Amino acid sequence: MVADPPPPYTEDRVTTQLYAWIARILAVGFWLSIGIIVVGVSLALLSGDGISEETLSVGDILPAVLDAEADGLIGLGILLLLLTPLSYVVAALVIFARQRDRLFVGVCLMLILLIAASIGLAVF
Amino acid sequence: VGRSGRLGEVLLIGLVAAAAGTLGTMLGLGGGVFLVPILSLAFGIDLRTVIAASALAVVANSASGSAVYLRARFTSVRLALAMQVPMVAGALAGGFLAVSLPEVALKGLFAALLYYVAFAMRRRSVPQVAVERPSALNDPYRLGGRYFDPAVDDVVGYVPHRLRLGLPGASLAGIASGMFGIGGGPITVPLYTLVMRVPVKAATSTSSFMFGLTASASAFIYYQNNYVDPSVAIPAVLGIIGGARIGAELTMRTRPRRLGQIFVFVMLGLATSMLLDALGVY
């Protein structure tokens, strides 16, 4: 692991905040999704069904989670993992908007639009 | 193919993924370039199922590995965000290509990618970049950065050059990532270091940071087209992230300088097997 370096130069508060938010979102998203997946896999193995070979469709995930079904938890974990990078873009959008950094608000909006397209268009 | 009953195969996929993650991290390639051909060739799993699993592993690996580089400021978030626009657009195109091309064509193209990676691994001389202090004059979009590099015990500053080549180049990396479920390091790292004159530490950290969002774009497409098979994807994800941790530790302790030259042959072997498989000879 890389040791925390001494503060080598001063940076503005906004940059510090941007980096801190993104690092936090990635860590929380990662551990939350892996945790849910591991619980789901444990349930699947304990029930004797084994790990399923298919994911539930997005609409079926929530009811399955409420029924504490292994497939539901596995699907939820996978979706949370996939939504983690998008979440940091949304956070960055908020920070850039507060700064009135029009260029990077545009960059973040384009990224959100592209991911939305990959979620939306994939259905067809 | 009933994999669900066979816990043994799930564990074996996890072990292969761990080995791929360890080796891929030590070579700076990520695990996908090893994992995808091995699972496809040796386990006979449908190529798109393997690619989808690898894409999920890339998202997880990027999320788990980026925090430490963000804290050290090796990663330039603004540069990553800007480069991700063409890269994610490319990944969308790549994902759609992967689900619509015949599997034979996809195998042939993957073989071509592996030959390219083997070729790129041959020369691993690290380009030296002149240190530049980013300012409002030379870096109007604030894409550059400054970080403390323990290797030289000094602050390194840099400004990315030639955005007009870099941005379109990122879309190519995105197509490869979306199509093959890899991060794209064999394309983005040379793009950053050779074309845009970004120092290696910033190039590798900013690249691996970008792979998460990029791979998530194509992973959504695979998910909706039912190519995400949890009995393959979950051991792949857990194996790759475990292996990446081991690989990072080993890289700290050893100097894997000659490793690249040795594994050129492994890569050529995988590329040729994949090609023969595509041609129906294998």
Image (cartoon, grey):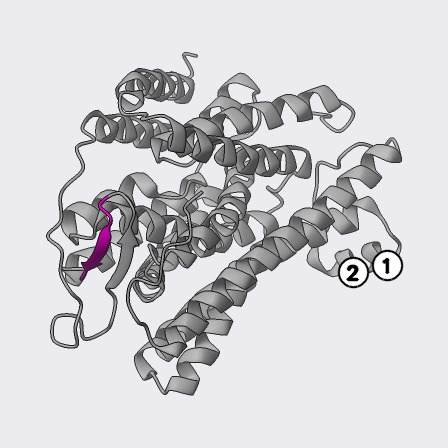
Residue B210's quadrant in the figure? bottom left
Find residue A59 and report its horizontal and vertical position in percent.
73, 61
Q: Is residue B258 visible?
A: yes
State whether residue B253 is above or below residue B144: above
Q: Residue furthest top?
A: B281
Dot 1: chain letter = A
Q: Amino acid at mark 1?
A: Leu
Direction from residue B1 to residue B62 in the image, left or right: left
Closer-to-camera residue (B67/B2) = B67
Q: Main secondary structure of the magenta part?
A: strand
In reply to whether residue B158 is colored magenta, the answer given is: yes
The quadrant of the rendering that contains the C terminus of chain B is top left
Q: Which residue is mark 2?
A: A62
Dot 2: chain letter = A
State whether residue B135 is above or below residue B168: below
Find residue B116 and report its horizontal and vertical position in percent.
26, 30
Find residue B11 and report its horizontal and vertical position in percent.
67, 24
Query: For the magenta stretch, what is the residue range?
Result: B152-159
Q: Which residue is mark 1?
A: A66
| Structural distance between the alpha carbons of marks 1 and 2 | 6 Å
